[in-house]
């Protein structure tokens, strides 16, 4: 079972290269302006906690489910995300995510802001396999980025993480 879950996440990791925005460097590359140094860690910061609007968390979790079930509401996406999420790409993502089932844990970790909007980073656990879910909104509250990344994906010994988002 562990191999199946990790395999699904790894398959999604590989099929998402086409979703990486032009000019993006490394995770959490929602846009070219998110630097690699902003890459979130799975553990929350030790210092003061940042509160997040429960409605944002509910929407982030809803969109994880939407990606699992290929039930996309295009009115909630910005123009770039509408172009990236083709019917074929949505089907590929849903095929990779749906076997994972609903997350058993979904925890807000941190908030990142830049000129293109605000990204909310969550830890999601699927059948004891952790993943990072990044949900980004522009100033008009349109979704301008979605990233999922397995936190325990297998890779070659000594190999650095690819830094590529899953979505």
Image: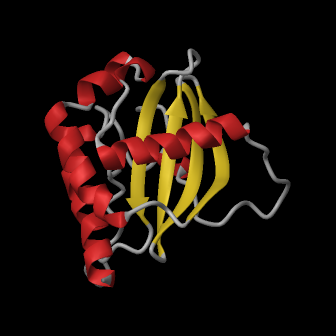
Q: Is residue 165 left or right of residue 36?
A: left
- Left or right: residue 156 versus residue 126 is left
Q: Nearer the viewer, residue 164 or 13?
A: 13
**Residue at image location 31% in from the left, 77% down from the top:** 154
Instruction: Please determine whether, in this image, residue 114 is positioned above or below residue 128.
Output: above
Report the residue at 66% width, 55% height from top: 109
Q: Where does residue 98 sit, x and y in percent of width and height?
A: 30, 57
Q: In the image, residue 124 lies at what x, y percent?
A: 52, 61
Furthest residue toward right? 48
Q: Closest to the observer: 48 or 35?
A: 48
- Measuring 81% from the left and 53% from the top, which residue is drawn there? 49
The structure's colour scheme is: secondary structure
Q: Is residue 80 above or below residue 86?
A: above
From where the camera sits, is residue 42 visible?
yes
**x and y percent of residue 117 in the render?**
57, 26
Location of residue 150 with respect to 133 vertically, above or below: below
Assign the C terminus to one quadrant of the image.
top left
User: Which image quadrant for residue 57?
Assistant: top right
Residue 30 in sight in this render = no
Q: Position of residue 22 (x, y in %)?
A: 28, 31
User: For residue 126, what is the image quadrant?
Assistant: bottom left
Residue sitting at x 70%, y 61%: 44
Q: Specify the quadrant that holds the N terminus.
A: bottom left
């Amino acid at each position: 079972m562990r191999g199946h879950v990790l395999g699904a996440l790894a398959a999604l990791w590989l099929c998402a290269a086409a979703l990486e925005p032009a000019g993006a460097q490394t995770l959490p590359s929602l846009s070219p302006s998110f630097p690699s140094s902003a890459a979130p860690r799975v553990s929350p910061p030790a210092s003061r906690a940042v509160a997040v609007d429960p409605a944002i968390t509910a929407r982030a979790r809803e969109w994880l489910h939407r990606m699992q079930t290929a039930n996309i509401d295009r009115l909630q996406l910005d123009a770039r995300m509408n172009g990236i999420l083709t019917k074929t790409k949505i089907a590929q993502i849903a095929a990779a995510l749906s076997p994972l089932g609903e997350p058993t844990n979904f925890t807000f970790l941190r908030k990142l802001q830049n000129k293109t909007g605000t990204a909310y980073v969550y830890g999601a656990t699927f059948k004891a396999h952790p993943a990072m879910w990044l949900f980004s909104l522009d100033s008009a509250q349109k979704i301008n980025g979605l990233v999922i990344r397995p936190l325990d994906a297998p890779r070659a010994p000594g190999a650095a993480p690819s830094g590529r988002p899953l979505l």
